Amino acid sequence: MVDAFLFWFLAIVTVLAGLSVVLMTNPIYSALSLVMTMVGVAALFVTLEAYFLAGVQLIVYAGAVMVLFVMVLMLFDLKHELQAFTRGKITGGVKIASVGIIAGLVVGAITLGTKALELSKAGAETSKPVVDSTKALAENLFLKNVFGFEALGVVLLVIAVGTVALSRTKGGTHARD
Amino acid sequence: MMNMGSTPFEITVNIIKTVLVFLMMVQLVPILVWVERRGSAFIQNRFGPNRIGPLGLMQLLADAVKFLTKEDFVPDKGNKYLFYAAPVFALIPAAIAYMAIPMSTPLIIGDSKFLIQGFEINVGIVFILGISSLAAYTILMAGWGSGSKFSLMGAMRASAQIISYELALGLSIVGVIMTYGTFNLTDIIQAQQGHLSFSFFSHQIESAFLPNWGIFYQPLGAIIFLAATFAESNRLPFDLAEGEAELVAGFHTEYGGFKMLMFFIGEYGHMMIASGLMATFFFGGYGIPYVTTKEVYEFFLSSTGVETTAHVLNTLVHFLSYNIKFIFFLWFFIHVRWTLPRFRYDQLMDLGWKTMLPWALANTIVTAIIIFASAQFSF
């Protein structure tokens, strides 16, 4: 009973927050709603007993990435951005396109989800609950998929270096000349 | 799921515990404010608040009445919703994160086992870091919602500082996690009991006068952790969010009355989390130095003869031990504020990114090498 209550409560909060990301006209409200969605997803991970994943979701996405988003958004003069965001032919086209993409995602998720449900029903009897999920995650990352993991790290490093190089040459805040 | 309550009894106990821990935190704040004001007065050769009640202790009540009766206003250019939401959100992360810190041995009465912490979570450290990292939003919401340039600039500074030092903070704990091989705070405390003893090149070394505390295994980690928590809770010498001459009061320039008080409670809440974690990771948590919890329990059992009484006394003594360490670190936080001068902003960022982060990384790598080598070559 408690589990069902928690799931429905968190699911409704997460979906509402996710909807308000798209429906809010003020970009700051959208960003804060996205934070709320992240927190909701982290809480849903907790109900699935994936505690480590929940913690990492909070630290990385809610605690670091979105803080930067919100910080940058708050520095803008939003009155101009607000109008550009809500009116105009190009944004209208983008909106219609994104509605199509989201509809496709929803349909895909439902069709794949029903398949996954059948699979999980079949596998539920055989698979045991993992006691130490942190250890299992670490083994998966650092033993089985270590090459992909390290390659992703290199890609992220390249992105960081590229960002610094671009912002320095194009007269960013720390430009020398 | 995670002992959150499968029966109505457990649910009731958990709700009562949640309320109790929250009230403990909130009730500690006025006392800390009093210690801070009297302590600063003592250091600066002043009197401080000494008129109301014995030693000025009733000043807290008078302040509370003043905060409650102040006019409740919203700045004209501010954003009303964010302005009201920010102080409320300032309380939540601090309170939830503090509940994960174990404060004493579990109280066992009959068949029931009551944990002296809000909830036990197997990845306690990750949970606390994750929840307390949400505090940056409160500051941003307050700064932007106030609609004032002082507030916004203060909020930018404070949140940039918080996310910069979060890295060093997280990395300084990685050494502790690797040393004890667990994320669970109770397990970390259990591993720190008794005398300092470890095996070194197949010699079992046991110290006669040092307790088995984490600070002797991770001294650099402890120093970085302490410095980073000062920055995380936005206190001197890292209180760049405020500055009377440049930024007025930073992100809470426009706040007054009870909303201001809630920011205060949030800030002290972060101090409490930092003190509790410092005690847990590096100073044995609720453990009493030199003795294990089991020895204490057996002592009480042999002297009273009743199991329940022994359990209750055991829990009480360890709760006291935890609180002595906890209050010492709170006092230390307050004392440092009135002792050290503040950094300049570029010095602050240099310290965070160019000094503390590399040192924390080096600490992690050296710890990893030592653990790996000791496992491989069994020394």
Image (cartoon, grey):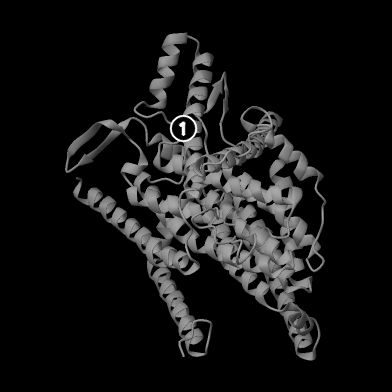
In front of the other: A108 or B77 = B77
- Chain ID, mark 1: B
At a point 52% along the width and 41% down the height, the residue shown is B45
The total of numbered circles placed on residues is 1
Q: Is any atom of residue B148 visible in this view?
A: yes
- What is the three-letter code of the residue carrying label 1? Tyr
- Residue B185 vs A143, above or below: the answer is above
Q: Is any atom of residue A114 visible in this view?
A: no
In front of the other: B210 or A96 = B210
- Residue B208 vs B363, above or below: the answer is above
Q: Tell me residue B325's x, y (percent).
A: 46, 35
At a point 50% along the width and 49% down the height, the residue shown is B337
In front of the other: B212 or B295 = B212
SS class, disc 1: loop
At a point 81% along the width and 44% down the height, the residue shown is B69
Q: Tell me residue B85's x, y (percent).
A: 75, 56
- Residue B295 vs B104, above or below: the answer is above
| B138 displayed left or right of A130 | right
At a point 49% along the width and 52% down the height, the residue shown is B230
| A91 displayed left or right of B176 | right
Q: Tell me residue B275's x, y (percent).
A: 50, 43
Residue at numbered disc 1: B286
